Image (cartoon, rainbow, N blue to C red):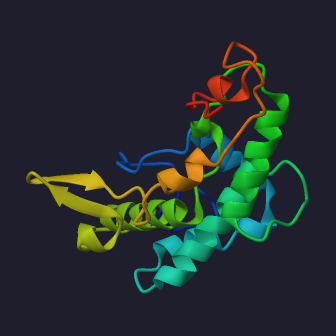
Amino acid sequence: MHSVWPPNRHNKRQPRVMYHDTTSGLYGKGKLQAVQLFKRSKYLQDIPEIFNNPKSAYTDIERAGERFIFALYCNTKKEESSLNTMRYDCFNQFVGQASSAILLSKLPPTTEAAHQYCRRTFHQVQTWQGKCLNPSSWGWKLVNKSLTLIYTIKGPKPAKIVSLITYGCNKGCGKKCKSVRANLRCNT
């Protein structure tokens, strides 16, 4: 999503990739893929306008970003109710196909992580346009006099819930154990 473009004075809908960006990317999703998605999807055409408008509300930015992320990760026309649901469905699909460790970084972001990502993207676009926004309101925090990403404002799942996950191991953990393949500690 970090390839949201400033308006082209000749054609506002024509994307132009320019400037250096500092917004982190989504794992395995490149700028070219994002540009191609914008070109072929009329459903996403209003997103650059939202990110270019300095008066856009958090909720508008977050909703636009969610639509883009849905489109970026979904290969089907299936309607998902939330990014968290899509993440869960993708995880189940990966587990069903896993023959080795599952890279959790390949999953779409959680809803809250996506919102922080969209805020950073909006901040980047506004910075390109010469607007000076407070980074701490837009997905960044100050740590030791340096800006660092806010990945999410919600912490990881409680250890108590993680400890309830079982994988049906009968004889301890070996190479066939799904928890070992997913780089998780087996609790059998």
Q: Residue at x 77, y 35 (%)?
A: 95
Kindly indicate the quadrant of the structure image that contains residue 167. Answer: top right
**Number of numbered callouts drawn:** 0
Between residue 77 and residue 44, name the one nearer to us: 77
Q: Residue at x 21, y 54 (%)?
A: 147
* Residue at the right extreme, as displayed: 77
- Can residue 8 be seen by looking at this rendering? no
Q: Quadrant of the N terminus?
A: bottom right
Q: Position of residue 158 (x, y in %)?
A: 49, 57
* Residue at the top extreme, as displayed: 175
Between residue 76 and residue 4, name the one nearer to us: 76
Q: Position of residue 89 (x, y in %)?
A: 79, 52
Q: Residue at x 42, y 86 (%)?
A: 55
Q: Position of residue 66 (x, y in %)?
A: 64, 66
Q: Position of residue 141 (x, y in %)?
A: 24, 61
Q: Is residue 169 above or below residue 161?
A: above
- Can residue 164 be seen by looking at this rendering? yes
Q: Residue at x 78, y 26 (%)?
A: 98
Q: Is residue 31 left or right of residue 174?
A: left
Q: Quadrant of the C terminus?
A: top right
Q: Is residue 103 above or below residue 172?
A: below
